[in-house]
Image (cartoon, helix red, strand yellow):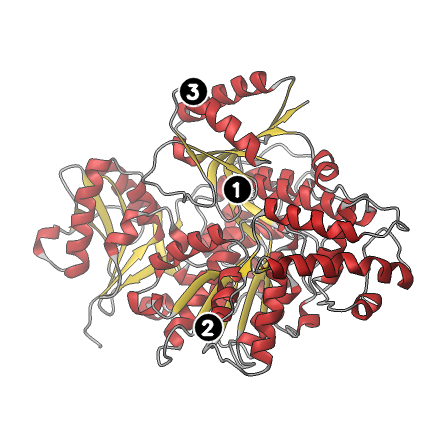
Amino acid sequence: MQNELRIALSIDVLKAYANLPRDRQQAATKFMEKFRSNPTASGLNFERIQSAADPRMRSVRIDQNYRGIVLKPDEGNLYLLLWIDTHDHAYEWARRHRVAVHPELGALQVFDASHEEAEPIATTRPEGSRLFDGLKDRQLARLGVPEELIPAVRSVVDEDGLDGLQSRLPQGAYEALFLHAAGTSYDELILDLEPPETVDTEDFEGALERDSSKQQFVVLTDDSDLAALLAAPLALWRVFLHPTQRKLVERDWNGPVRVLGGAGTGKTVAAMHRAVWLARKHADAAGKPVLFTTFTRTLADDIRSQIAMIATPAELARIEVVNIDSWALSLLRRFGYRHELLFDEGRRRELWARALTRRPDSLDVPDSFYRTEFERVVLPQACMTADDYAKASRVGRGVQLSRAQRRDIWPVFAEYRSQLRGANLREVEEAYHDALSLLKNKAHTPGIRSVVVDETQDLSGAALALLRAAVPEAANDLFLVGDAHQRIYRHKVVLSKVGINIRGRGRRLRINYRTTDEIRRWAAAQLAGCAIDDLEGQPDTLVGYRSLSRGPKPEEILSASREEEQAVILKTLDRLVGSGVEARGICIVLRTNEELDEYASAVARSGRPVLKLTRDTSDTDATPGVRIATMHRVKGLEFDAVIVAGYRGADRYAERFADDGDAGVLVDMKTSERSLLHVAATRAKRFLLVSHIN
């Protein structure tokens, strides 16, 4: 409607709101509710600001001490709420900042327009050489730099100078300059930009519709849950998607999509928003047309609660969020499947002990070899007979076997399956094959129109083949996000070999929004020399993967005993809390469950509240205390500070857990252990301590 009032909230308002004292937040909430209802209400006390950078800016009263800064463009009925602060600081903000539609990109930008050039910093560069001398003014403008800030950008001589300019630049412009300084060419950068053919710099409402503006502003509508938005203002990913994420989420794809990206690049965020977008698109479908699945139950539980924060009740009702094992079993149950899935490791060892009574005397391998052979060759390739096994590929297995030797050891596998049947049990991989057979025989149609998969690198070939069969081949059928650098389970799959064709639909996210660059570099270094794939069998690297924030270097310590180390960790907790880090924003991470119990007891004995995160406990803000979890459990979580405790080295853990004497298994285990440390380290946003123990 032409005369309809529109209210847009800047991301900076939410950041400012989060920093307000608790008693002031209540007043700010009441103000914003009133402002949203009627921005022209007389009680808001609009006041002109002398010397404001933009004469259209006004001050509005929140309470006796706090003011909001609002801008109403000359045309239309749009009101922009830009900032909240104490009276003097709010007025100073208004004097320094401008809001404008960028003439090249058409994005609505907020930036510090004060006339200050970056202070030149001593550098080893040749005299007169600055960081962006290779770019012309027009090129800087095309990267999103406002005209007023081009002289300041020109004055930057190195990365430290660029860091100093970050708070003044629009977010998109800073990202482009950061990536260029890190080695991304100008031509590569502009490929990701989609400037409109023409730009009306006075059309603020039109600018708000562009993806680049939605990274900075959210338009409040009747459906907007302002209270929920303010209740957790730091979870800005809920509303302010990066333009590259939004391009992945809000479009029709003509087939399966694979999205790669290092830790912290927002893959899961994009996947969750994609599920909500698909639920909105499939509003005419009955039941739950969107399936969102991942490998572990705890991660599925976390994702379900987060999707509930961004979806309407109607959208949420059309999305099923469940881990892949549970979904496959529920599918089978509809057909009277009576088997239980085997998860109990003790029970599994018992059944293998019985199966090993059939092992041949002619083969000199450890007992553990048989189980690993079954899990890495027999199950993935669905070998049901000795002939199947004789033809199976054993690439990656260190122990060579002739066809005759394979036939000699087949009775061990047959006996293990017999033991499973006798106990009414099935291995999960075989349940996947059973479910796939049902779908291929068209005995059941799940009614799914779209599948979204998180942590794709951890799913097996059988699981992915099952998901491919569960949804008809059509537009928007499969959306898969993952990163093999974070593969912490043994599965390694080539998507095309399980019927998932992503040709022309592979995308990558490169900017890490979670960790500092110092933590990113440390975590990436743990994978140096490891062979990592792109989920299509090709090598993948972390080239171009960058973090936009800076911080202290990760700390590493070496202790001679558990007692010595635990004393250091307790002092570190005090240091972090003393510096303003909330206890619930700190996580102590251990490699094993046994270590988890030991360290949780040590922290509890010190009188500090502690929450042990297990498969059955969620990380909720309502529960106080330091968090403590295993490396596997923290997958998908993030914390202000992470302490990796009692760490004994990737190679030592690999040798401990890869006990079948197969060189191929040992190599895989070493890579998995390094990936596990990489995952644990990248849960940290600002502080990382890795504590080694002899």
Give the residue pinned by disc 3.
Answer: 605
Looking at the image, residue 643 lies above or below residue 232: above
- Residue sitting at 81 percent across and 55 percent down? 396
- Residue sitting at 48 percent across and 72 percent down? 336
Q: CA distance from mark 1 to mark 2?
A: 39 Å
Q: Nearer the viewer, residue 101 or 578?
A: 578
Q: Amino acid at mark 3?
A: Arg
Q: CA distance from mark 1 to mark 3?
A: 26 Å
Indicate which disc, 1 or 3, sits on the residue closer to the N terminus. 3
Quadrant housing the C terminus: top right
- Report x, y in % for residue 377: 75, 60
**Can the viewer see residue 82 in this picture?**
no
- Report x, y in % for residue 165: 49, 43
Of badges 1 and 3, nearer the viewer stands 3
- Report x, y in % for residue 543: 68, 52
Judged from the image, the secondary structure of the residue bearing numbered disc 1 is: loop
Give the residue pinned by disc 2.
Answer: 334
Judged from the image, the secondary structure of the residue bearing numbered disc 3 is: helix
| Residue 683, disc | 1
Judged from the image, the secondary structure of the residue bearing numbered disc 2 is: loop
Q: Nearer the viewer, residue 52 or 570?
A: 570
**Can the viewer see residue 418 in this picture?**
yes
- Report x, y in % for residue 329: 51, 65
